[in-house]
Amino acid sequence: MTTPVINEEDAEFINSTVNSLYKVISTIPGSHHALVYIKSAYQHDPFRIALELFLVFFAIRYMLSAKYTPHDNAVKLTEKEIDDLVEEWQPEPLVPPLSKYDKFNMEKTPVIMGAQSVKPKVSGHSKPLMNLATTNYLNLLAADRIREKAIKTLRGYGVGSCGPPGFYGTIDVHMDLERDIAQFLGAEQAIIYAQGFSTISSVIPAFCKRGDILVCDDGVSFSIQKGIQISRSIVRWFKHNDMDDLERVLEEIQLDDMVNKKRLTHIAPLDKLVALKKRFKYRLVLDESQSFGILGSRGAGLTDYFGIPATEVDMIVGSMANALCSSGGFCAGSEEVVDHQRLSGLAYCFSASIPAMLAVASSEAIQIIKNNPQDLIELGERAKTFRQILNHKSLEPLIELFSGDIESPAPFFHIRIKPSFLEEHLFESENKVSREEQEYLLQDVVDECAQYGVLVTRAKYVVDQERVCPRPSIKISVTIGLTRKENEKAAGIVKNAIIKIFNKWRK
């Protein structure tokens, strides 16, 4: 076998080409170190040369191979076949068809014509109705001061920020409202959210994660239930407002040596909760969505009512959509608690901030409550009078009030059908009266009240998602917007409607 001979001219050409290429590469900064590295690496590692050559060839083959196109094997249809398929196609409904009960709820939803007030015009009624269906406890809807400030703010700031607070959604009125809430409650700082419902459902998962323990009242609101579900924490339940049962649960956990970042959630006797919190070294989360603005000598909620400093509670969560007649929610606590939510509160980070005019309306509402403590006293007296009328002995076999305590400071309560009344009116084929039948009965009472000039409403629940769904009820919200005489008249109308409708039910 002969070896091919390279003539002198070819050798000189190859040599000059390599030298020229080497000189070009040498002009590149750092090329010397790269060449030394490559030379040493390939000189002592022949396997590396083989591997990289294989990868180079694989890359070249991959780039030159036929490209894959989706649906290459799809069946080709003719125009007629396509038209036939289109004609046969029936779209599925986006929502399931309405049941009889769903249609009933839609038909019975009152429609207010015009502005909300203590005597709104309701569709289907010729005269305005006395409104006991909204949380306008202190009649702040009629405050000209709030309306004027809101209009002025709307003209100066526009409708909304269109951005979350952490980006460009925070303006001076938002910071003013946070300061006003913190000062009103006596807390270090406060943070505001754009939606009342999502406030507590964001606060809980911001501080409690998988593996943590939540000790909760089994009657907590639906928004708290959702916050607990999102947190994926271990949950231990105690009976509603039962401090003895709460203590039992805490002692069981302590015996199990599972004490680690726990929370207590719900409105309950605050003095006992604080005592148990200190004894078992827990954190306390207090939901004041219903009590903020109406309880206590200043209207500052349960801490004010029980005379306990707000700093004794780790987190106070509330809604500005109830007593303040505005929108949004807040969480008050220490500086660390508030700052943590600015990065971890889901509804704070990913929702647009509250419109400026609503923030100003909330600040003004707080100032009105602070300057008019006599309104809180008057509200308590109105609620007491309403309860006294509905606690009449003629209603005793028919209904139960929650809370029916005459001295209760809450200006709202629920009217529920007495279980013994339902048992007495069972059909022979029934074991119990269905929830829907109870709702129909209560709606008849609502309609009867409306015929005589009083607007009340049934309490609405997401029945299939509630952990323990409350029994059907009519919710009464007392307001100082009505005069004392009108308040007593409205209570009398509700009382007479209950007696009339209940006495002819199933007869």
Image: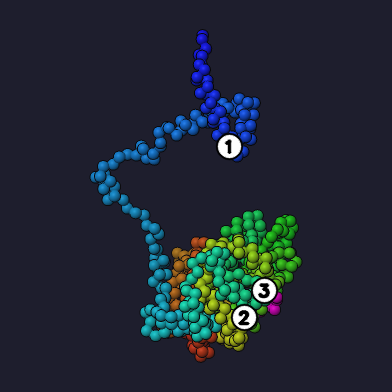
Residue visible at 49% across and 33% down in the picture: 59
Relative to 313, 400 lies left or right:
left
Tell which residue pokes out farthest to the bottom in this image.
Answer: 485
Tell which residue pokes out farthest to the left in this image.
Answer: 80
Residue visible at 49% across and 30% down in the picture: 58
- Residue 34 percent coordinates (x, y): 61, 35
Disc number placed over residue 120 in the picture, else none: none
Q: Earlier in the sequence, mark 2 or mark 1?
A: 1
User: Could you say whether the residue bearing mark 2 is in a helix, strand or loop?
Assistant: loop
Region of the chain picked out in magenta, as a range: 305-310
Say if the magenta span includes residue 23.
no
Q: Is residue 506 visible?
A: no
Q: Earlier in the sequence, mark 3 or mark 1?
A: 1
**Structural distance between the alpha carbons of marks 2 and 1:** 81 Å
According to the picture, the residue beneath numbered tag 2 turns out to be: 299
According to the picture, the residue beneath numbered tag 1 turns out to be: 27
**Structural distance between the alpha carbons of marks 3 and 1:** 69 Å
